[in-house]
Image (spheres, rainbow, N blue to C red):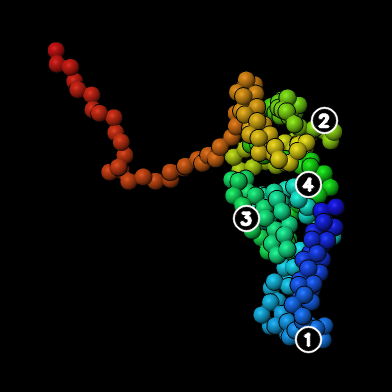
Amino acid sequence: RHSMARLVHYVIIFVGFLLALSALGLEITKLTIMISALGVGIGFGLQGIVNNFVSGLILLFEGPVRVGDSIEIGGRWTEIKRIGLRATTVETVDEADLIIPNADLVNNQVTNWTLSNRRVRLTVPVGVAYGSDVPLVIETLMACADETYMVTKTPPPQVLFLSFGASSLDFELRVWVLDADYRIQVKSKLHQEVDRRFREANIEIAFPQQDLHLRSVDESIVLRPPETKEVME
């Protein structure tokens, strides 16, 4: 409906323009000459405008993006507010309006998170100290996912033991969120739950550590204990 409404809008403007020219007494033959001259001008100076116009029609009829979709373009997460004649207006998470030429949406790679559904997957990497109880870590991470709002039951959460890292045992908690718009809030809640439950279970979250081994040290910089004073009787 939105695509047809925009197309009808453009047709009405074009027909109104032709009727206005006819009312001014302009003949059709002269109009043809003007259109031909306009075509030459478009070929040289208005390529960008025509490209954006055609790209706008492609967006309206193919529907790779629609009004209300959440898209990621240029590393920014935005929501489409309006698809116009020349450009598309999107709103960033900071509620700033961003004007994007339609050709950019057609020619460049755009991630549409809500084209087929609004569900999105989150991954939360977690590293625990060597010597930790692996089954307990997996059980605790699953409990964090089960108790977090907006995390789906189907597909179920998943915990993977990925690798033996340089300073930690590396796990990854994978969950599905019902609505992509709440992904940041859900991720924050998961982080809080992991921190709280790990403290309760005495599971240590690892951090980078290095051991320093000294082969030789200059005697002038060695710290020596103070000499004991003899007690005079």
Residue 100, x across and y down, in percent: 66, 60
Residue 153 is marked as: 2
Residue appearing at x 27%, y 43% in the figure: 220
Toward the viewer: 39 or 230? 39
Q: Mark 3 or mark 4: name the one nearer the start of the chain.
A: 3
Work out how far the residue at label 1 is from the one at label 2, CA to CA, in angstroms: 68 Å
As drawn, 231 above or below 101:
above
User: Are discs 4 and 2 less than 8 Å apart at CB?
Assistant: no
Q: Mark 2 or mark 3: name the one nearer the start of the chain.
A: 3
Residue 153, x across and y down, in percent: 82, 30
- Is residue 153 visible in this depiction of the protein? yes
Q: Nearer the viewer, mark 1 or mark 3?
A: 1
Q: Secondary structure at mark 2?
A: loop
Toward the viewer: 130 or 80? 80
Q: Residues within 10 Å of mark 4 (few under 14, many from 20)?
A: some
Q: Amino acid at mark 2?
A: Lys
User: Outermost residue toward the left?
Assistant: 233
Residue 74, x across and y down, in percent: 65, 57
Work out how far the residue at label 1 is from the one at label 3, CA to CA, in angstroms: 41 Å
Per the image, the residue denoted by label 3 is 98
Quarter of the figure with residue 61: bottom right
Q: Secondary structure at mark 1?
A: helix
Work out how far the residue at label 2 is from the one at label 3, CA to CA, in angstroms: 36 Å
As drawn, 148 above or below 105:
above
Per the image, the residue denoted by label 1 is 30
- Is residue 128 visible in this depiction of the protein? no
Q: Mark 1 or mark 2: name the one nearer the start of the chain.
A: 1
Q: Amino acid at mark 1?
A: Lys
Q: Mark 4 or mark 1: name the one nearer the start of the chain.
A: 1
Q: Amino acid at mark 3?
A: Leu
